[in-house]
């Protein structure tokens, strides 16, 4: 009787261990592999003396070392002057066209994750606030691949 109980316990533990191992390998880590590249377009945006909020779209491309696209790669995106800092200069939007996107858009804080489509492309936007002078780098990271894009805004004084 005691050996039957011990056997059941061992089988339950074995089943739990196998389940955990299988769940861990289900593709939660979708960062790009070593040697891959991230390409940002445009690599910089600049606006001078803007008196209204301006929308800028960015395209991120993830590629394997041989240049083929990486589908469904997760890319971490952040900027030092973006919301939620105390005096933000711009706001990230999860999709292109910022607040002008038909059907609405999703505001996201700096430090969000975007995912490339089946062609290895992710497109998002920022809205740079009017009358806020600054220069910042938007940083992109996935695995060991990194890239950046520069955002510059000047005001008339």
Image: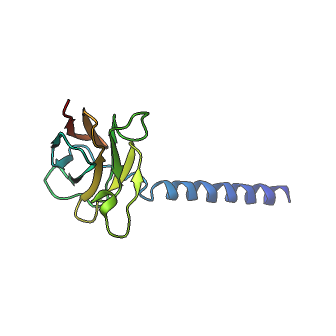
Quadrant of the frame with the N terminus? bottom right
Residue 43's quadrant in the figure? top left
Please state the horizontal and vertical placement of residue 84, each as a whole percent of the image.
Answer: 43, 40
Vertical side of 138 occupied by 99: above or below: below
Please state the horizontal and vertical placement of residue 60, each as a whole percent of the image.
Answer: 22, 52
**Residue found at x 21% / y 43%:** 50
70 or 12, nearer to the observer: 70
Please state the horizontal and vertical placement of residue 157, each as a whole percent of the image.
Answer: 20, 29
Q: Which residue lies furthest to the right in this view?
A: 1
Give the left or right position of residue 74, taking residue 24 as reference: left
39 or 88, nearer to the observer: 88
Please state the horizontal and vertical placement of residue 105, each as a whole percent of the image.
Answer: 37, 61
Q: Residue furthest front?
A: 157
Q: Which colour scheme is used?
A: rainbow
**Residue found at x 25% / y 36%:** 137
Q: State the count of labels.
A: 0
Q: Residue furthest bottom?
A: 103
**Residue found at x 13% / y 53%:** 66
Give the left or right position of residue 55, taking residue 18 as reference: left
């Amino acid at each position: 009787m005691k050996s039957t109980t011990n056997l059941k316990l061992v089988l339950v533990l074995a089943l739990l261990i196998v389940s955990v191992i299988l769940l861990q390998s289900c593709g939660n880590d979708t960062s790009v592999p070593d040697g891959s590249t991230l390409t940002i377009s445009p690599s910089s945006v600049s606006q001078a003396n803007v008196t209204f909020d301006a929308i800028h779209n960015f395209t991120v491309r993830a590629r394997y070392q041989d240049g083929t696209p990486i589908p469904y790669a997760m890319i971490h995106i952040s900027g030092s002057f973006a919301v939620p800092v105390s005096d933000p200069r711009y706001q990230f939007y999860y999709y292109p066209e910022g607040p002008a996107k038909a059907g609405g858009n999703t505001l996201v804080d700096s430090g969000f994750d975007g995912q490339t489509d089946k062609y290895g492309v992710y497109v998002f936007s920022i809205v740079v606030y009017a009358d806020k002078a600054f220069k910042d780098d938007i940083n992109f990271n996935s695995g060991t691949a990194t890239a950046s894009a520069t955002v510059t805004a000047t005001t008339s004084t």
